[in-house]
Amino acid sequence: MTSRTSAPSALPLSHAELIRYSRHLVLPAFGVEGQERLKAGRVLIVGAGGLGSPAALYLAAAGVGTLGLVDWDVVDRSNLQRQVLHGTEMVGRAKLDSARARIADLNPHVHLETISARLTSANALEILTGWDVVLDGSDNFPTRYLVNDACVLLDVPNVYGAVLRFVGQASVFDARRGPCYRCLFREPPPPELVPSCAEGGVLGVLPGIIGSLQALEAIKLVTGVGTSLVGRLLLFDGLQLHFREITLSKDPDCVVCGPHPSVTRLIDYEAFCGIGEGGRGMRDSGEITPGELSAERGRTTDLVVLDVREPFEWEIAHLAGARHIPLGQLPARLSELEGHADIVVYCHHGTRSARAVEFLRAAGYSKVRNLTGGIDAWATQVDAETPRY
């Protein structure tokens, strides 16, 4: 069910609003014009959970004129450790009811539109139409791909965020000016390799950090102030308190935003992500034999072969043209690997490379495979192509 009324007109700020937003009005390059653009802006948040909670609170407090929330769930006691939009008294009630009460109290000048529905391929285009910015606060891969594809089809910027355990990431995907989510993650990782927050846990403050960054990006997009995260992926490590950035490029072969897209309508995203009846058996095992790798290298020029052994092992022997990142250095050197690259990882016998594949897939690299038996098997089966053996 959709709850919508007429959005407020783009009118000059009232006296009450001038007082409320006074700290914004004195900001250089923002001022009254930026606040009036914010008042006229329309931002839709998908999900009123861990990421959507801080994003909704700060967007409402900032004065976004029309704020939309899509959610179908109820408040659970386990949500309260991180979903700050909700309180103990709202346990068992719809998250949208909780959000409506909290946002009305926080800023009565904000017009809230609530859409009580699970976002699906059948309703996404209708729900996402008419918004200036879509902020993705979802916590699963099917919804992320759905939001991305719908935003590409509708030419709407998608403010992305994700969290797990102690790490998070954020970006802005806008196919008109840069890459989309599929340019970075062409295919989803196998569902059995990526735990949900319920399975893997998440530090409660982490969604607050990433969700606030998403709110910041939405404000910048609506007002035109600053430089957005289009073409950049921001990675945050909460344990080390470390931010780093990866430059993203548009995938010329992207099936959604490329020059010759094959995805021109919304698909079954649970099947695409290998979830449910429709997705069983769709994902490969993530293994590649030496013979198969040899054949692929002969016909694929952009295949990335990654050696994760130690430097002394690399010096003894390695595959020609391979890249070398020891397993222990992989988390700090992810920026050296393109997010949409087709990667084959190898080590001595295949054990360390299997761990590297699991790590890369958890980090969002979807096209990653392990060389069965490692370089030892390669030397035995493809001897003529192995250097220094």
Image: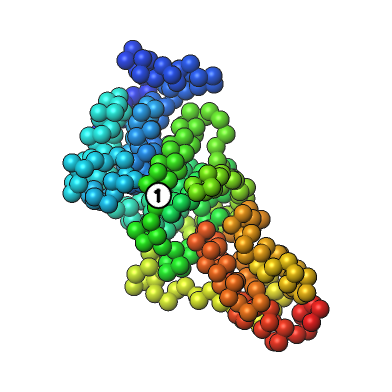
- Residue at position x 60%, y 71% in the image: 353
Instruction: Choose top left, top right, bottom left or bottom right for residue 287.
Output: bottom right
Q: Position of residue 316 (x, y in %)?
A: 78, 74
Is residue 24 at least partly visible in the picture?
yes
Residue depicted at 50% across the width and 49% down the height:
239
Which residue is at the far bottom?
380
Left or right: 307 with respect to 105?
right
**Compared to 79, does 4 lie above or below?**
above
Instruction: Give whichever of 82, 4 is nearer the camera.
Output: 82
Where is 109 relative to 315, above or below? above
The residue pinned by badge 1 equals 203
Q: Is residue 129 visible?
A: no
* 77 displayed left or right of 354: left
* Colour convention of the picture: rainbow
Identify which residue, 162 or 315, lies in the foreground: 315
Q: Position of residue 338 (x, y in %)?
A: 63, 57
- Residue 120 is situated, as x and y percent measured from the top left of the image, at 33, 56
SS label for mark 1: loop
* Quadrant showing the C terminus: bottom right
Q: Position of residue 283 (x, y in %)?
A: 47, 73
Tally of numbered discs: 1
